[in-house]
Image (cartoon, rainbow, N blue to C red):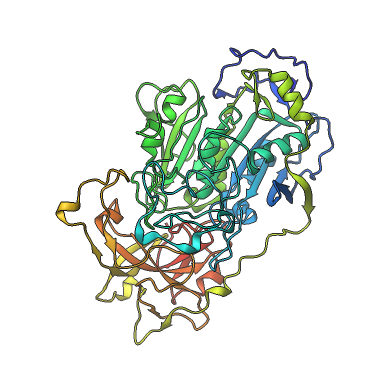
Amino acid sequence: MLVSAATVGFSRPVDPDSPPLGGVRYDPATHVAVGSAGCGKSSPYTAGKTTTATGKYAGVTWTYRIHVPKSYNKNTPMPLILQHPGWGMSASSEDAGAGISKYADAKGFISVTPQGMNDNTHNGGPWYSWNAVGTTQSPGPGGATCTQKASAASYCYTSCGSCSDSPQCWWTTCDETVTPTGTGTKDVGGFIPGLYDTLESQLCIDTTREYASGESNGGMQTYQLGVDLASRLAAITPEFGSFHYGFNLAPDQGVPVMDLHGSEDGTVPANVSLSDDGYYYTPVTQIFRGNSFSSGWMASNGCSGKVSHYVTPWDGTKKFYCFLEGDCPGGDVVRCAWKGGHNWLFDDATANGGLVTFFLLQWTKPSHLGLGVSTGDEGAEAKLAARAARPLPLQEIELHEDDPTPAADFSSWGRTLEPAAKRGHYGDPDQGCQSDEEVVLAGRGRVCAPKIGASFAAAGDEAQDAAAHHPTPPTPQCELGGVAPSRNGCPVDAEVDEHSQAWPVCLAKGNATDAYMAGQFHCMLVCPCPEGAGADCGEHSHAHCPKGATCQRGELRHRAHGVCTYHGDD
């Protein structure tokens, strides 16, 4: 059955009590599709093909990739899924790695991969990013969002003007992606809501089945959208994302959510706050169950009762397991984990896309009529008609035969490493490590990692910092993280090819669950990883590593970078 949301005078009554707010499980036998304003119009995108498009929002040009399935019919409303890339990932790379578009034809939905903003002139890019969950608002309610040793002036984007926080924790664009500040619930707008509205006006979309997903920084954007577009989105799947500590929020109505994290992910950790590169995030338990900053997602979805096993077709593979946080009338609240790092499920696009679409397409939001207008809104009919009559939020839309995104350029890295006398650092553990190194897990393997010392707070200073809501962390004898070579306190001798552009990075890595607070700091080699749909960055990237090592994604916040590691496939 189809109800047109583009027509004033709805076939379905505008009733604040019916349908219910929150997520409702999809039943194809009874589902009532609500057609968007684009139903009946000719599509600007070719069915069965992926198209790259650009458009301006508030004078800023944004990029997105869209795959309209072969079965698309301009009179039949279809679901819509937006997948948001991680930090440094182009839309095309994300499309290949996340695997959502792989299922668009078979499952019958429109797949869109928007691209974050790249307005940073410092070396180390690409800098594609999303302004969400407090990435440009430090210090916040929970204090600074990073430690002093993670402070990086190069992370300040042009759109942010002068990043005046100390330590310098801002690390994404300040261009508006959902709210002016990238957090909070006021003045919701920006590129992503504008993209949803534009696509509704161009295509025949079922407005009750609009979804958001994303990984890493894109997973953060997804959580923020779940809060700010709660009345619109039928479900969300944040993949290894979080809120910065102090910025976690919960939606004002039920939004089904599935959180996915690798159990070995220290980049945006699921169970502790402080990341390997010195940033404070909100543990998933607090996102779902609440803390002093938020009532939590479970309260929004009305969850009660015991935690139980959430069954999926992937259970048991690489220790994959999901928990359902009780009985939730407003939509399931699920957390999933697998034995892996900061990467897509099983380091595999097919598995990741399968899980994401498996969860999302189970849900509808019958209260959403279109263009962000819901049945419970005051004057819903008039509001919807007014929004349908306005110009498209995205202006000057252009379709491109070739991807207009510049290819990632790592030439600015130059050569950082020095020729090793005899045997250098960062070698193969099977050949033995140097006296100042320890064997550390990295990617799917392990590496000899130079150990970096740290100083701990004196006994009298160990009381919790009331402003930061955290104990005083140890201070490493290195500068943490970064996206380009710097003098950071790591050794620079390694047995690499003369053309290698690999460089050392210092991270809190070790055998402890909370390596940072345990003072376990080590150095690894960063290698360029612009392509690749999983953990393996490809032969071109491997060539930057010492002989016998491979370049693998999954340890760094910048998703176009990998680390050199040895002997690991599982």
Q: Nearer the viewer, residue 185 or 420?
A: 185
Query: Seen in the image, is 342 located left or right of residue 90?
Result: left
The quarter of the picture where the C terminus appears is bottom left
From this view, report whether residue 374 is shown above or below residue 263. Answer: above
Tell me which corner region of the image, top left, top right, bottom left or bottom right, holds residue 317.
Answer: top left
On the image, the x and y values in percent for residue 277 come to 39, 58
The quarter of the picture where the N terminus appears is top right
Tell me which corner region of the image, top left, top right, bottom left or bottom right, holds residue 334.
Answer: top left
Q: Write the residue at 40% across / 74% down.
A: 487
On the image, the x and y values in percent for residue 177 come to 60, 44
Q: Write the residue at 76% across / 32% down.
A: 204
Tell me which corner region of the image, top left, top right, bottom left or bottom right, holds residue 123.
Answer: bottom right
Q: Nearer the viewer, residue 64 or 551?
A: 64
- Whether residue 461 is visible: yes
Q: Nearer the viewer, residue 221 or 446?
A: 221
From this view, report whether residue 405 is shown above or below residue 498. Answer: above
Q: Write the residue at 50% across / 59% down.
A: 558
Query: Seen in the image, is 28 located left or right of residue 215?
Result: right
On the image, the x and y values in percent for residue 143 come to 36, 46
